[in-house]
Image (spheres, rainbow, N blue to C red):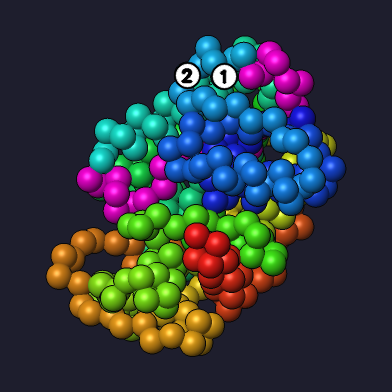
């Protein structure tokens, strides 16, 4: 059985349905801070079965211990946590408390109950460096002034130090690009808050006439002035997680990081794709509030391709089509 933390969030819910489709047994823990029970209903409807769910905060170690004691867990996929670079500057304490405390509590519970297989979802931003050619041998820039990035760097350090204490640990750290897309047929996807933190949901709000304009940061050191990012379909991420679990089964005493990257695009180019897919006009204005961003974030994911036999398959056009389909379904169904 596989424990998925944050299993009712955008990424977590897709991981759950992907595991169930492979015949795996799953138990979900989530505190519903970034999720709702409607997602659980959708998961059970798609899977056609009851899915064990425990509402707890992963930071509550005694409560988490009980989950490990109740269920026969073989591996953990850790998707829980706060993920917005910009928000983390406004709420540094929340980001450190949530992200760092989560991994410490989870590792303590795993250590206590003898579960030693972990897939941790990190981000390409963890390097703290601007490049479209990041790779796993690149050293972290520990001076980059962003609480989210620092929290992810701390998490990886904590994982590495814990791994060194016990030769039974088998750990894969997946450093993800920007996740976009939705499950096939638009029945599962990202529920968009009225004030989303990510660019694609904001663009879809404009396309659906729920938002007037997008404020565009255009001072990046790139060809068109907007930041360049790697976008990867959520289902490609699920396949990377499946590949990691399969690979870990045959490993012993290992902790490896893998870049999980997809199609690279500037934000201006992304806007053009959203226009094409939605057949809507996307109005942009120059942002009044300027902030520092990493100009480029991308990787060629060669290590994942060589070791995990994984490569991103789905185009950015496909990502937007799938996310738009789910977004329209949620609008139509209230």
Horizontal side of residue 301 vs 206, given as left or right: right
Q: Farthest residue toward the left?
A: 288
**Residue 168 appears at what percent x and percent y?**
71, 22
Q: Which mark is residue 64?
A: 1
Q: Which mark is residue 60?
A: 2
Q: Which mark is residue 141?
A: none
Q: Quadrant of residue 228?
A: bottom left
Whole-angstrom CA distance, mark 1 to mark 2, is 6 Å
Q: Farthest residue toward the right?
A: 23
Identity of the residue drawn at 41% across and 47% down: 83
Q: Quadrant of residue 98?
A: top left
Q: Which residues are magenta?
A: 67-90
Question: Is the residue marked by circle 2 packed among few (<14), some (14-19), or many (20+) residues within 10 Å?
Answer: some
Horizontal side of residue 303 vs 291, given as left or right: right
Horizontal side of residue 317 vs 113, given as left or right: left
Whether 138 is drawn above or below 154: the answer is: below
- Do the CB atoms of the residues marked 1 and 2 lie less than 8 Å apart? yes
């Amino acid at each position: 059985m596989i424990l998925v933390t944050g299993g009712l969030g955008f990424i977590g819910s897709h991981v759950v349905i992907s595991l169930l489709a492979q015949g795996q047994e799953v138990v979900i823990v989530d505190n519903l801070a970034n999720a709702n029970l409607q997602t659980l209903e959708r998961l059970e409807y798609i899977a056609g079965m009851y899915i064990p769910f425990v509402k707890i905060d992963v930071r509550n170690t005694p409560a988490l211990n009980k989950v490990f004691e109740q269920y026969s867990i073989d591996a953990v996929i850790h998707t829980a946590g706060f993920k917005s670079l910009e928000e983390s500057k406004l709420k540094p304490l929340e980001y450190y408390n949530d992200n760092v405390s989560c991994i410490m509590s989870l590792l303590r519970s795993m250590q206590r109950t003898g579960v030693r297989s972990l897939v941790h979802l990190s981000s390409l931003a963890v390097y703290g460096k601007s490049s479209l050619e990041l790779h796993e041998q690149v050293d972290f820039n520990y001076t980059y002034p962003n609480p989210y990035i620092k929290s992810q760097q701390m998490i990886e350090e904590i994982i590495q130090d814990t791994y060194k204490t016990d030769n039974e640990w088998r750990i894969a750290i997946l450093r993800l690009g920007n996740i976009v897309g939705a499950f096939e047929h638009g029945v599962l996807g990202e529920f968009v808050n009225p004030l989303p933190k990510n660019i694609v949901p904001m663009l879809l709000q404009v396309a659906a006439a729920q938002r007037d304009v997008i404020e565009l940061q255009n001072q990046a050191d790139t060809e068109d002035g907007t930041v360049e990012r790697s976008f990867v379909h959520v289902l490609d991420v699920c396949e990377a997680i499946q590949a990691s679990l399969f690979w870990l089964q045959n490993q012993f005493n290992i902790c490896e990081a893998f870049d999980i990257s997809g199609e690279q695009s500037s934000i201006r180019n992304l806007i053009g794709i959203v226009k094409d897919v939605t057949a809507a006009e996307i109005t942009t204005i120059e942002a009044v509030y300027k902030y520092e961003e990493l100009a480029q974030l991308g990787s060629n994911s060669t290590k994942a391709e060589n070791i995990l036999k994984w490569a991103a398959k789905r185009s950015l056009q496909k990502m937007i089509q799938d996310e738009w389909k789910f977004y329209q379904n949620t609008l139509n169904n209230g």
